[in-house]
Image (tube, grey):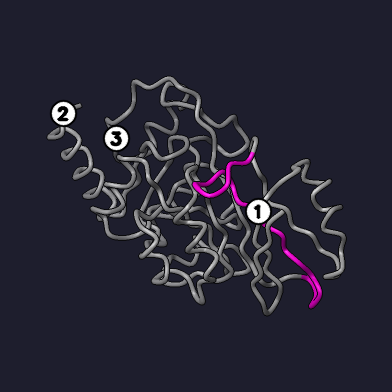
Amino acid sequence: MTQKEIAEDIQTAVETLRRGGLILYPTDTIWGIGCDATNEDAVKRVFALKQRSDSKALICLVDNANRLPRYIRNMPDVAWDLAEVSETPLTIIYPTGKNLAKNVLAEDGSVGIRVTNEEFSKALCYAFRKPIISTSANISGRPTPQNFYEIEDEIKNGVDYVAEARREEDEKKSPSSIINNTSRLPDEKSLAIITLPSTKQNNFDGFCSCLKIYSSASYSLSRALEQSSISSISFSAISRNNLFSFSF
């Protein structure tokens, strides 16, 4: 696509979002169904198209970490670090969202937001100036499409605009890593240990998943490492009142 065609593609998608419409668009992971994350009626249409319960939360995309404080209450400092250094798509679950459609949030008020660095979705989020829903382009319970060709016609015909960008790519894509950055743990002594994905500062072998350990603060960290199957990691830990960082 030429730069002019890309600009027109983004402009049409933005106009569709502003009208409360649904779009199908490429993201930093898989193709996604998108809408204005502040528009409750548009979000309802996403749930209806996916035939999915609205009790399940949705993920939002933004183009820049500087937008996060507008949509998150009491943003933890560690979130800035994670958003800035991650080289792979990383969705962080924040304890309390704000200024978003109510049906975007989980039942406990938390929300998943990802800063996208993929060219099209980043430009789209920048042009729209608000978070955009990003949920897999499939009917709930059916296989997740790994590229545009695998998306069912039921989804393509159910949105108001299908982006032209990156349709020809047949490379298999995967969903993002997810970190639960909540400080609301089951008891005062609980620790949530969160491993960072591969970053500029830390090159882990393979994928470092989120470890959540519900036990006393004296829980054996070596045991935690054993369970993670990772021999050398760096991670952040959040207790109810404090934020700590550790390296091994």
Front: mark 3 or 1: 1
Looking at the rendered structure, which numbered label has been put on residue 234? Answer: 1
Q: Quadrant of residue 218?
A: bottom right
Residue 163 is tagged as: 3
Q: Amino acid at mark 2?
A: Thr
Residue at 68% x, 80% y is 241
Identity, as a three-letter code, of the amino acid under mark 3: Ala
Name the residue: 44% across, 65% down: 101
Q: Which residue is mark 2?
A: 2
Identity of the residue drawn at 50% across and 61% down: 81
Q: Position of residue 28 (x, y in %)?
A: 42, 40
Q: Secondary structure at mark 2?
A: loop
Of the numbered discs 1 and 2, the one sitting upstream in the chain is 2
Distance from label 1 to label 2 (Cα)?
Answer: 42 Å
Residue type, mark 1 in image: Ser
The range drawn in magenta is 186-204
Q: Where is residue 209 drawn, in percent x and y?
A: 67, 46
Q: Quadrant of the N terminus?
A: top left
**Residue 192 part of the magenta-drawn span:** yes
